[in-house]
Every structure is written in C-alpha cells, then in structure tokens.
Image (spheres, grey):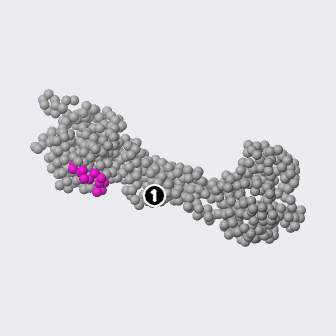
Amino acid sequence: MSSRDASGTPAPVICIEHVSKHYVRGQEEVPVLADINFDIARGEFLALMGPSGSGKSTLLNLIAGLDLPDAGSIIVDGVDITLLDDAGLADWRARNIGFIFQFYNLMPVLTALENVELPLQLTRLSRRERRERALTALALVGLSDRVKHYPSELSGGQLQRVAIARAIVSDPTLIVADEPTGDLDRKSGEEVLSLLHRLNQDLGKTIIMVTHDAHAANAARAVRHLEKGELSALVENRQ
Amino acid sequence: MFELILRFAVRNPLRHKLRSVLTLTGIVVAILAFGLLGTIVSAWYAGVNAASDKRLVTRNSISLTFSMPLAYADRIRAIEGVTDLSWENWFGGIYKEPSNFFPQFAVEPESFFRLVPEFRVKPDELQAFMRDRRGAIVGRKLARRFGWQIGDVIPLKGTIFAGDYEFVLRGIYDGARASTDENQFFLRWDYLNEKIKQLFPGSENQVGIFLIGIADGREAATVSQRVDANFRNSLAETLTETEKAFQLSFVAMTGTIVKAIQIVSCVIIFIIMAVMANTMAMAARERSSEYATLKALGFRPWVVGALVYAESIAVALSAGGIGILLTGPAARVVGGKLDNIFPVFGVAPETIQLQWAAALLIGLVAALIPARQAMRVKIIEGLRQAG
C-alpha cells in the first residue's frame, strides 16, 4: 500500500465501513454504534471525543481487535480484522497494536523493563535483543533510570510512560490510547500528551486516542466527536 | 515464554504474603500428615517386607493358637527341598507392667539364629546363650528401651505358661537392615519346655510354628505342599506358607485399620486441595484485569492458564518439599513414642515419592477451575476491572 494517494493525501491505514455494534442488557438491546464509516490516514493522531456511553471506547476496542462488530468491516493495513478468529486476532494485535490504558495495566510483579519487554515475548527475538529494544523504548520515554523499578515504586506519570514504552516497543502499526491522561494530575498528563505528540510527529506513529478531556484532545492533530452512536466530521486541530 | 511463566509463578505468590504463608503452612501440614500416616502403614507392613523368601512357616491348620507335636521336626527335615529347620513358641510374658509390651519367643537355640541371619549376634554372646538354659537374647532397641546390659536378670511373668520366670541376658542382636525388628526377646525353647513339663505335665513337646529353610524361593509352593501332604489326616494337620504370606495374615487381621488410615490420608489431601483451589480462585479473580491485559497484548489463553497452573504447582511443590523435609524428623519423634507398637518406623522412599505426587496433584487440581476461569476472561470485561 502506497503511503499517499493520487491527490497527495496520506493513504488510509484504517478503513471502517458500515460498522455497527450493540450490547444486550438484560432483555434489552442497546445500540452503541450505528453504521460508522471513516478512514484514518497513516501517521494520523486522532482524538475520539464524546460523553460517557457515546461508544468511543467501543469503537476503539473494535479498531484494536479487542471486540468484533455486529456488522461492517474494519480493514487495518489491508487486513479485514473482522474475518479473523480469536487466535488470529491475538496474533494480529501482538504484531500491529500498541495499547495505552487509562490505568496503565502494568504487571505489578514485573519491573519496568520486564513490563516493556512483555510484548516482545511473542516475537522470535533473542533475550538480548528484547532487552536492548526495551531499554531503548524506556530511554525514549525518559525512564532509563527506572528500569529496575516495580510499578508500585513509580508515580502515575512514570507508570503511564512505562505503558507508552510497552506500546511502542514492538513498533506497531497503530497505537490506541484509552483515556491516557484520565488518571493523571495535570503536569503528568501534559508530559504524557507531549510524549504522544512526539511519537506522532517525530516517529510518524499512527495514534487513536479516546478522551473526554478537550485539553487532551487538543494534543491530537484531528478530532472526531461521537454522540449517540454517530460520528461527526473530522476537525483538524491547529498545532 | 517458559522463563516469563516461571517469573510470574515465583513472584505472584509473594503479593499476598499472609495468604500465601497460610496456604503454604496448610499444605506443609497436610503433606507431613500424609507422610506420617504413610509411614505408619509402611510400619504395619514392616514384618512382611523383612520376610525372607527362603523361609517357610508351618503352623497348625486350624489356628495359630493350636500347637503341633515336636515329633514333626524329624519328618519335616526328611522332606525333599528342606535345608534347615527351627521351631518356636509364643511366650507372652509381662515385664513389670502389661504396658511394657514386647514380643517374646521361645526359640530352638541352635538352629534359630542360623536360619534367621538378619538377627546378628556376636559369636561369643551366642555361645553364652547356648550354654545357659535361662539365657536370653534381645534386640538392640529393646535393650536400650529398658536399659538392659549383658548379664542382667530379666524377670517375666508368664501369662500363657503361668509362673514367674527369670532370664539372664546373654546377647544383644543388631538388625542386618534398617527394616529389621530390634524389639524382640528370645528365650530358649528347651528351657520353656522343661518348665512346661514341670508345671503342666502332658503339655510338653509342643511347637507353635516350625520355621523351614529352603534353598530356592521358587520351590516354596512345592515344598509347602509336600510338608502339608505329609501331615494330612493326622491329629494336627499343618498349613505351610512363605514367611511373607504368614506375616501378611497378621496384617490382614488389622486390614480395616490400615484402610481407615489410608482413607484419612486421602481426605487430608482432598481438604487441602479444596483450600488451595480457593486460594488460587481468589488470586485468579483478583488478577482478571492482568489476564485481560495479557490477552489484549496478544498472549493466547493457554499462556494465561499456564500462569495459574505454574503458580499453583510452584506453591504446592515448595510446601510439599518443606513437608517432606519435616517428615523425617517428625517420624523419628513419632516412631520413638510408638516403639513398642511399631519396631520399624522409618520414612520409606515410596512414601516420599507419594508425598511429591500428592503435592503435585494438589497443585494441578487446585489450578484446574481457576485456570479455566482465567483463560475465559473476556478482554473488555477484564480491562474494565482495572483501576
């Protein structure tokens, strides 16, 4: 796939076509997403905004291959992930997705270095190569001096930076961040947003971030709003 | 991947130290109890295991309480395949108090220690026993139990052969193997026979059992048949069997007790299995967000299941190891207290193997349901529990 189309617009890395999703609560069917269609260009940094229950996290989970839509297709880098089975999706996620969660989701019994190394356990890299890559990722997020610290010994901002290092260590196609600053104080939140910005600007990483915080959304290059299962047009942010 | 699973298995139990220590202690106690009960069962069978396959025992076919004429000795000696012969009677005396129980046998002095070489007596002590009709030879443990020295006079009150008897300790035997019973007391059959002649005229020259030596254990059945055929239709028909079968018939009498002990052992393991399963289920429930994260990162469900299994097995085997280490010293203490009931009380290698197997089983079974739960954690639901 070429990185730009004929008009010079970056080629989409994600194509979402007619995606719908509903949940069942008791006897009731609750529609969450209704016929969603949009593309995400390679190298994009998109913020998905919306009130609670608007379906933004559901959409993010579908794009990240954590859940499957009721209808429609999600094509990521040429692969329709809705056609993959559980094992295929697991392998696909390991190769293509870097996750950043609101509550970091680090393993408490592993050091920062071991946590970052975790996704590389699913590759064929040697122990030495894994270690080198994890150290590089930690250096990139400014935590070279915390490699042997356990999560309980790190601050919230540091924990999220470890999580970011874990998300980028396997050089994924896409980074998905679900409320990455939601559990952080303002200063730590700024650091994390600045880091995501750098990853997008300097390393060309495609990032989709779910947030309900307008300030956080401003760090992205573009914003889409999701309300009552429907998606608004793309709004470019001024950088 | 193996290294990663091992890392989780070693570190995860340390997250809730108190809970882990309590679970560990429970398993240690269970494995220790399982080992001790297993040792008791082994002790029950000690006589059987120590029996020689080159010795046969002939008794009255009606019951062991009925005797046989000494005259049978010459006829047995003449049977093809018999290489040696001795005989003995149960004495059943009381040393000071009935609670001071130990087995006492009146044995034919010349042949007995030749036929039972696992009772090792110094030649000079054996000579002294042969010279003294009131002589006695006792096992090392028995001598130690009552502080007897060579030359001591040991009074016994006869119960079967009523009367007061005094024996002079002429020798102390040592067992050839660790499993040899060193708690027995041997007096001379000819001395007892003489006493019977005086006290109960007409009851002399009777034998409790004949001990027959054979050259080849494979001939045991044939020789047994020849012996019994020889005394068919006589006043005291005989039943001949291997020494092992003879010992087993005693164990069979208490088979229900052995069975009860074995059931209790299994119940203990089952209870601790349930306790451990509960611990693992709690741990797995608490960690569902971690399992969801691992699955989100691309780890397959079997890896998540392996984490639970590895942790459960690591805890169970560590506790099992401690329990096994404690079994030896505990068995020495218990064995010391039960010396008069179980002369041979040592932890057998088979018991240790069973303890390891039980610990492994605890680990495996306890992880069965929690691992299944962990493998089935839905990523979205698991991730929601974080924070």
Q: Nearer the viewer, residue A82 or A225?
A: A82
Q: Nearer the viewer, residue A88 or B363?
A: B363
Report the residue at 59% width, 56% height from top: B347
Q: Nearer the viewer, residue A190 or A132?
A: A132
Q: Based on the displayed image, in which of its 4 quarters is residue A76 positioned?
A: top left
Q: Position of residue B13 (x, y in %)?
A: 40, 54
- Side of A90 relative to B368 (left or right): left
Report the residue at 64% width, 56% height from top: B178
Magenta span has A228?
A: no
> Dot 1 surroundings within 10 Å: few (below 14), some, or many (20 or more)?
many
- Side of B382 relative to B260 (left or right): left
A23 over B386 or under it: above or below: above
Dividing the image into 4 quarters, which one contains the N terminus of chain B?
A: top left
Report the residue at 87% width, 67% height from top: B198
Q: Position of residue B179 (x, y in %)?
A: 65, 55
Q: Based on the displayed image, in which of its 4 quarters is residue A56 positioned?
A: top left
Q: Residue furthest left?
A: A238
Q: Amino acid at mark 1?
A: Thr
- Side of B340 relative to A132 (left or right): right
Q: Nearer the viewer, residue A25 or B75?
A: B75
Q: Position of residue B130 (x, y in %)?
A: 80, 62
Q: How many marks?
A: 1
Magenta span has A145?
A: yes
Residue A104 visible at all: yes
Q: Residue furthest right?
A: B202
The span picked out in magenta is A141-153
Q: Position of residue B325 (x, y in %)?
A: 52, 57
Residue B157 visible at all: no
